[in-house]
């Protein structure tokens, strides 16, 4: 990495820490720390939701998959686009209203407990356990991705890169809480968006235009142009089913809860959906054009930038397809611009890790410490418990990530399925069905989470190659409905539901 690129990188990291320090002085109570005092405008909420959602997968994983397999890997992008839109369309406004009606709930477990008036705290504790279980590994996957970026960019050892990257993310999350996370995610979302628009446009122009690029890819591998060639129905269902995960991701739906007003949802939905669709298109085009571009480059030039290539069937290709965005950044742009583009990759990784750390720490502070051990804990005490929890969770995640061979995408897919299957159906039914009961919700969460664990860890081959979110989501839905049918919500619960429906129409 050149000096100019290094300077750009350092300035970016310093800026993120400065935001964390600034927000430290605006964080006075637990609501501020875990929900920003419900003050997010539509732009910040939309872009921070998108940035915390996509992680390094958008700039590394998806372009790499398209580079390696062609347009057959684009089904996941379609499923995610649909899922993100439906989440904004149906969940955002109703959840924003209901969390305030239900005793001003500030976390997902807090909302579920208040929604069902669960005085036993069992629903809260089980929900928090699910969050801690899946987020620890989800956060770890981000630490691995960040370490690999630092390793490749700075020539550091994997271990040094891991601890430096972890320290930066933990610092601004620890200091500023939700406001720091949301505003850094907002800036990171803009950076990611610009990078995903600029890189493919410049790359396509370098290839001589879109038609030329398509012809070049077709000559190398015609199957790269076909979305269905070599893809079975289970694979397509599994890819599109990623969209189901949106309804249960705590780090995404908490942005809905933090909006300053339910009236901001339409504007936030437009911003968020536009960001998502254009970003996914950019990632797809980056990987698609990359195959033809890399095949024509001089090996000596690539090696100068630390880009390793191999030859397959007479075609020069990247050794690691997930580095195609990094390769474009270094080969097509001035070192200063390259530094910004590489910072965009780090942004994608950091914006997800910080959100996961915050949700996990709030689960420990609000849903364990306060609910079980210190019911009279002050807001200041809970904020500091949340900060200590951030350090503890980050430390565990970093220790898990010390193995550089950890499978980042596998861990992401596993955690995404876990949250989508455990919380998705229950959140939807809680918002739109008056008849759902506490026992139904509790059973559904457990069945969804356990199905993902068993399906993902112990079953494989044949029908079991289906992405575990599909059986987990629908078994949760069935169990929740069946058990709820045999119970009846209290009059107070039904009254709150009716009030939410009424307010949501305003």
Image: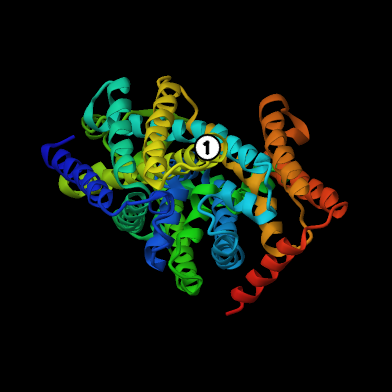
| Residue 338 in picture, x, y percent from top left | 22, 46
Residue closest to the far left: 3
Q: Residue at x 72, y 43 (%)?
A: 442
SS at mark 1 in the image: helix
Q: Residues within 10 Å of mark 1 (few under 14, many from 20)?
A: many
Q: Is residue 61 left or right of residue 387?
A: right
Closest to the observer: 231 or 117?
Answer: 117
- The answer to whether residue 367 is above or below residue 392 is below
The picture quadrant where one finds residue 238 is top right
Identify the coloring. Answer: rainbow
Closest to the observer, 335 or 275 = 275
Can residue 228 be seen in the rendering of this structure?
Answer: no
Horizontal and vertical percent for residue 462?
Answer: 76, 32
What residue sits 54% from the left and 36% below the top?
368
Judge by depth and name the residue closer to the eye, 107 or 357.
107
Could you tell me which quadrant the C terminus lies in?
bottom right
471 to the left or right of 393: right
Placement of 198 over or under 370, stated as above or below: below
Q: Quadrant of residue 160?
A: top left
Apparent side of residue 204 relative to residue 504 in the rendered image (left or right): left
Q: Residue at label 1?
A: 412
Name which residue lies at 76% across and 42% down: 443
- Could you tell me residue 376's position as x and y percent? 49, 43
Work out whether residue 440 can be spotted: yes
Look at the image and tell me in which quarter the N terminus lies.
top left
Q: How many marks?
A: 1
Q: Position of residue 95 (x, y in %)?
A: 58, 62
Residue ID at (16%, 45%): 11
Q: Which residue in the rendered view is the most extreme toward the front? A: 376
Q: Residue furthest bottom?
A: 506
């Amino acid at each position: 990495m050149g000096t100019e690129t290094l300077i750009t990188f350092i300035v970016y990291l310093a800026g993120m820490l400065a935001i964390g320090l600034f927000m430290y002085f605006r964080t006075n109570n637990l609501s501020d720390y875990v929900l920003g005092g419900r003050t997010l405008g539509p732009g910040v909420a939309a872009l921070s939701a998108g940035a915390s959602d996509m992680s390094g997968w958008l700039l590394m994983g998806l372009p790499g998959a398209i580079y390696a397999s062609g347009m057959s890997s684009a089904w996941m992008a379609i499923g995610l686009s649909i899922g993100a839109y439906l989440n904004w369309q149906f969940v955002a406004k109703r959840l924003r209203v209901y969390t305030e009606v239900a005793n001003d709930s500030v976390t997902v477990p807090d909302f579920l407990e208040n929604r069902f008036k669960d005085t036993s705290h069992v629903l809260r504790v089980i929900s928090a356990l699910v969050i801690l279980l899946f987020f620890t590994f989800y956060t770890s996957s981000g630490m691995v991705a960040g370490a690999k970026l630092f390793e490749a960019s700075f020539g550091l050892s994997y271990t040094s890169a891991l601890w430096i990257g972890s320290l930066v993310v933990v610092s601004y999350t620890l200091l500023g809480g939700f406001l720091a996370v949301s505003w850094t995610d907002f800036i990171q979302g803009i950076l990611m968006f610009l990078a995903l628009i600029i890189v493919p446009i410049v790359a396509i122009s370098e290839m001589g235009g879109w038609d030329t690029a398509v012809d070049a890819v077709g000559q190398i591998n015609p199957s790269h142009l076909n979305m269905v060639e070599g893809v079975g129905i289970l694979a397509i269902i599994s890819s599109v089913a990623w969209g189901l995960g949106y309804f249960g991701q705590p780090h995404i739906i908490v942005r809905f809860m933090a909006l300053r007003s339910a009236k901001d949802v339409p504007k936030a939905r437009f911003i968020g959906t536009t960001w998502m669709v254009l970003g996914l298109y950019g990632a797809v085009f980056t990987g698609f054009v990359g195959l033809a571009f890399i095949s024509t480059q001089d090996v000596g030039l690539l090696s100068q930038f630390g880009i390793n290539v191999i030859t397959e069937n007479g075609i020069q290709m990247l050794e690691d397809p997930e580095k195609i965005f990094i390769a474009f950044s270094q080969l097509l742009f001035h070192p200063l611009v390259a530094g910004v583009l590489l910072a965009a990759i780090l942004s994608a990784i950091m914006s997800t890790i910080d959100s996961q750390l915050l949700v996990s720490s709030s689960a420990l502070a609000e849903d364990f410490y306060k609910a079980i051990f210190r019911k009279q804990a002050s807001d200041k005490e809970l904020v500091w418990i949340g900060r200590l929890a951030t350090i503890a969770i980050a430390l565990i995640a970093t220790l898990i990530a010390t193995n550089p061979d950890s499978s980042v995408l596998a861990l992401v897919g596993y955690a995404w399925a876990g949250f989508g299957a455990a919380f998705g159906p229950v959140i939807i039914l809680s918002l739109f069905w008056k008849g759902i009961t506490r026992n139904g919700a509790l059973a559904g969460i457990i069945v969804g989470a356990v199905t993902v664990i068993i399906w993902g860890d112990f079953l494989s081959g044949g029908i079991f190659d289906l992405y575990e979110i599909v059986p987990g989501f629908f078994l949760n839905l069935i169990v929740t409905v069946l058990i709820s049918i045999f119970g009846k919500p209290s009059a107070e619960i039904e009254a709150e539901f009716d009030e939410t429906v009424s307010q949501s129409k305003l």
